[in-house]
Image: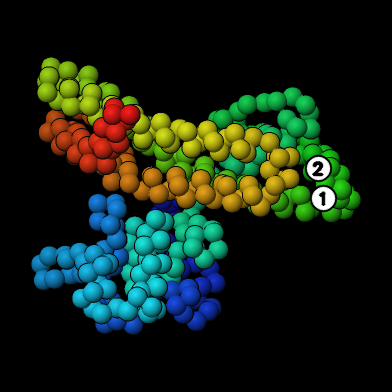
Amino acid sequence: MSERELAASGKAAGDGEQEPNTSTHFLFQSKVFSLPRGYFTLHEHTEPVFSVHLGDVWGKIPFRTLRESFQIDEKSEDARLLGVVEKGLKYVKEIRPGDSIPRELLDGSASWRVEERHLSIARGRLTLQLVSWISGKEEMITDPYELEKIVEDPQTKVRVQEAFSKLAKQFGLPDERKQEIVDKVDNLARELSYIEALRERFGHIQKMMIKLVHAKKIFRSDQQLSNDITRMVALAKQPLAHFDDIFEQIAGQTAEVMAMLSTFDAQVAFIRRMRDDLHTLLMVWDEMIDMWDGHDPERDAETESRLKRTYQFLAKNFLISKVWQRGG
């Protein structure tokens, strides 16, 4: 499963061992929620609706209409679950009656999975911090392959163990309790692996923007299309800068292992909050990422169609913020 595949059913290892109930699953009582193929989603990325199949079309029922038309009492369990659905749609694109509640709302962990490479990168970054800390020589390496080589280097492993021993002493722990520090660093790596997965996902948007610039060169003789691409790049500038700001915040907050360990619980809460914010923002871009991945711009109708859809996407989602920016 890729880093962006959501656990739509909400099931994970161990879920099958417990009896589903309304504290962990979306178990509704009203018959409207038993309609075949019905599911909850966000209309236009903002309004939660219940989508139902009506013959040859899909109907989208806003939650207010659901409550009024099907007499769902505001104090009922169904009403409470609808409130949980609204919160849950921040983390998953679709929720179906019977699904388990997203893990973000249950225990703070993520409802989606990361690849092993993301965990390796996160461990590499922390390892580099430990080595820099114990040696007093700061190193900056961002290339994943270089990080992996450093982690596997025998000398690095020796230095890391020295760092763990020194950290244990800093926190007043005897060397035989060094494993407590090791476990905390490993937990931090697991939390940060989600940030690495999201950073990789954001990289697809950056590649898409490069393709737009390339497309402008291809269609430079088409004044209208060339102007449209210029507007697309302008519309994307602010949301992309927002992503950069979040990643910079994370980098600044997690730059020192000692500081992270000193405020471990607060650091985990911060990383998870940033993870959820990034995840929510990136979900909006999923359609564009999937559309442009594996497609290099050419002077053809297919590329023109993709450019048109991209313009529509950017104008629909980011034009308002652009106007407000100008008016500020």
CA distance for labels 2 and 1: 8 Å
Residue lying at the far front in this picture: please name it: 328
User: Residue shown at 35%/70% (left/top)?
Assistant: 82
- Location of residue 104 with respect to 73 vertically, above or below: above
Residue lying at the far right in this picture: please name it: 174
Where, quadrant-wise, is the C terminus in this rendering?
top left
Q: Residue type at mark 2? A: Leu
User: What's the image's color scheme?
Assistant: rainbow
Q: Is residue 287 left or right of residue 312?
A: right
| Spot occupied by residue 228 in the image (x, y as percentages of width and height) | 18, 27
User: Residue shown at 63%/47% (left/top)?
Assistant: 267
Label 2 environment density (alpha carbons within 10 Å; few <14, some 14–19, many ≥20): many
Residue lying at the far top in this picture: please name it: 221
**2 or 1: mark nearer the eye:** 2
The image shows a total of numbered marks equal to 2
Mark 2 touching mark 1, by CB under 8 A? yes
Query: Dividing the picture into quarters, in which one does residue 143 lie?
Result: top right
- Location of residue 91 with respect to 167 vertically, above or below: below
| Spot occupied by residue 135 in the image (x, y as percentages of width and height) | 78, 28
Badge 2 or badge 1: first in the primary sequence? 2
Q: Is residue 57 left or right of residue 259?
A: left
Residue hosting label 2: 167
Label 1 environment density (alpha carbons within 10 Å; few <14, some 14–19, many ≥20): some
User: Residue shown at 75%/32% (left/top)?
Assistant: 133
| Spot occupied by residue 223 in the image (x, y as percentages of width and height) | 12, 19
> Residue 178 got which mark?
1
Q: Is residue 168 visible in this depiction of the protein?
A: no
